[in-house]
Image (tube, rainbow, N blue to C red):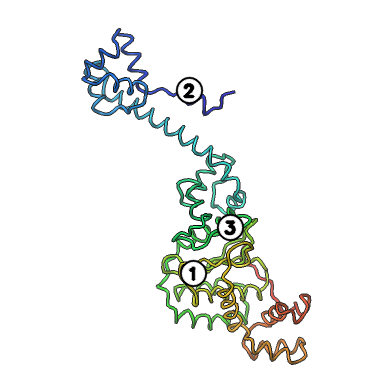
Amino acid sequence: MATDLQLSEEMLSPPGDTIQETIDTIQMTQAELAERLGRPKEKLNDLIKGREPLTRKTALLLERVLDIPVSFWLNRENAYREELMRIDQQKFLDGCIDWMEKFPVRLLKKMGMLPDTQNKYELSRALLKFFRVASPKQWESIYLEQELTAAFKISLANTTSPHAISAWLQIGEIKAMELKLPDFDKMKFKETLQQVKSIVIEQPTDFHLQLQKKCAQAGVAILFTPGLPKAPVSGATWWRRNTPIIQMTDRYKTNDHFWFALYHEAGHILLHGKKEVFLEDLASTPVDEKKELEANLFAQKHLFPIEALTKLLSTKITTDRIADFARIYKTHPGVIVGQLQHAKQIDYNQFNEFKIPIKIFN
């Protein structure tokens, strides 16, 4: 049974059909018409079969020979080419549907990144625009190929769901394009990270907005992007031209995880290269363990340094001691609990009353 697309192709009529009908009516052969037009017979046959476009010059010649206006021929040609292009586009989008269905389309629609439609052609077209690529092949060359590109010095080929992860990164890219920040100031960002400690301690409900504002003044973009299914990323660091981007989720839901992740990403900005993308907590991606350790130590130094942790561990760990150390080292007690649990010095169910649930997205 023929599909709608096949039927459209079969019914497609080039301007040459009208030329043939006209000369049949006046009992003129193609050879005679070619002679009267001053065109080779082969070229005329290509025109009649739709293999050659009908140009303005040819339209003028047809007007002289067949007494049919130039405007008719040009309109006929334009309508044919537009329909031909529509069919070609439908064929192309047909081949994109399998690719499109690998992405978390439902959630991307909910976030307003894709149109709220069930039309798979429309969704495929919108997804290409979302990624700013001409075809799935270009998406693959950017996100999957081992030959690393200038855009992303990382390959998602070995991850379990490169489609979801690339979508999460692209949401950040779109948000980053909307920003207008001053030039990145490394010294100012270092000072900002010290100032942010007051937000860590107080943990206000609008902590994320305060954080964004402070870092923006140093030329650093803090972006909050909801996690996507099959994209278990807690955060990422990358550069858009000369602007460093920290893209974060609220995956772990508590302040200790959030602040450690934030300072970890800040460490990547201050310690590592501009052409790298650092994806946190994502299995199967290539990891530079040395750089990840450096970022961890950077975060620990700013939030609760190793010497403080060692000193705390030399005493009996109690609620009062945790609160005292938080005051002395100007941090949040929940952050200390998180470090103690990560170091396996206390159980994961101990002292969790110090941790504060966080909510970034409604």
Type of amino acid under label 2: Glu
Q: Which is closer to the viewer, label 1 or label 3? A: 3
Residue found at the very far front of the displayed protein: 147
Mark pair 2, 1: CA separation = 54 Å
Disc 1: which residue: 221
Q: Give the mark, 1 or 3, whose residue is nearer the N terminus.
A: 3
Whether residues under marks 1 and 3 lie with C-beta atoms below 8 angstroms apart, the answer is no
In the rendered structure, find residue 165 and report the number of the disc placed on it. 3
Lower sequence index among marks 2 and 3: 2
Q: Nearer the viewer, residue 34 or 24?
A: 34
Quadrant (top left, top right, bottom left, bottom right) of the N terminus:
top right
Residue 252 percent location from the top left of the image: 67, 68
Residue hosting label 2? 10
Q: Identify the residue at horizontal 69%, vertical 75% (top origin).
A: 356
In this rendering, the label closer to the viewer, 2 or 1: 2
Graded by Cα atoms within 10 Å as few (under 14), some (14 to 19) or many (20 or more), the crowding at tag 2 reads few
Depth order, front residue of 2/284: 284
Q: Amino acid at mark 1?
A: Ala
Quarter holding residue 224? bottom right
Q: Does residue 266 lie above or below 87 as drawn?
A: below
Q: Is residue 297 above or below residue 51?
A: below
